[in-house]
Image (cartoon, rainbow, N blue to C red):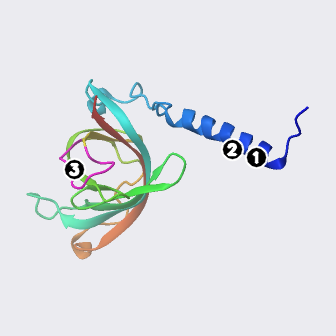
Amino acid sequence: MKAFTLTTVSCAAASTLLVLLTGCSSMPPKASSFSQDSLPDAVKVPAGHKVVMETVGAGLITYECRAKKDMAGQFEWAFVGPDASLNARNGSKVGKYYGPPATWESMDGSKVTATQVAVAPAGAGNIPHQLVKANPATGNGAMTGVSYIQRTATKGGVAPSSVCDAGAVGSKQTVNYQADYIFWKMM
């Protein structure tokens, strides 16, 4: 009968672990569980695209009190831009979202701007769902090849309820918000 030493057992365990880890590295990435089924048609991404990244954006949106265009004597809180952290579903920071112009930037330095295609209501007190068509990315990384970005699951972010009148013109206020940003690429 062969006697097993600690070295023999350690080598066998290490070899088994190496085989298991090698097998894991060849496994396909987990498919996204995101579904557009509950979204309004206006903000659905066209067929032929796949989800490549799901993030949760949390931060602030800045508004400025301005005169309404072509409406003398009327004022409104106008959207200035966001300042948010983009986090993976597991909570780890993967990038940031800021503007103007609206820019999604990955921690790897790649970034993308986009043009709004459509919006749809997301419930009282929440900024709308949004679909934007991405411009070509700068830098190489996670944002390379992104074709569309959806804003879903919004919470908060609407313009302030405080008075915006001639006396407040130029003043800025920030509001908290959260939204999921879903990144799509051509299949």
Give 83 or 143, whichever is nearer the viewer.
143
> Whole-percent x and y of residue 121?
34, 38
Instruction: Of the two numbered discs 2 and 3 on the same chain, state the one appearing first in sequence.
Output: 2
> Whole-percent x and y of residue 49?
29, 29
> Whole-percent x and y of residue 96?
37, 59
Q: Residue at x 43, y 47 (%)?
A: 55
Residue that label 3 marks: 137
**Label 2: which secondary element:** helix
Answer whether residue 71 is magenta in the image: no
Where is the N terminus found, in terms of image quarters? top right
* Amino acid type shown at disc 3: Ala
Can you tell which quarter of the image residue 58 is in? Answer: bottom left
Instruction: Of the two numbered discs 1 and 3 on the same chain, state the one appearing first in sequence.
Output: 1
Q: Is 186 rendered above or below residue 180? A: above
Q: Which residues are magenta?
A: 133-144
* Amino acid type shown at disc 2: Ala
Residue that label 1 marks: 10
Looking at the image, residue 185 sits to the left or right of residue 67; the answer is right
Residue that label 2 marks: 14
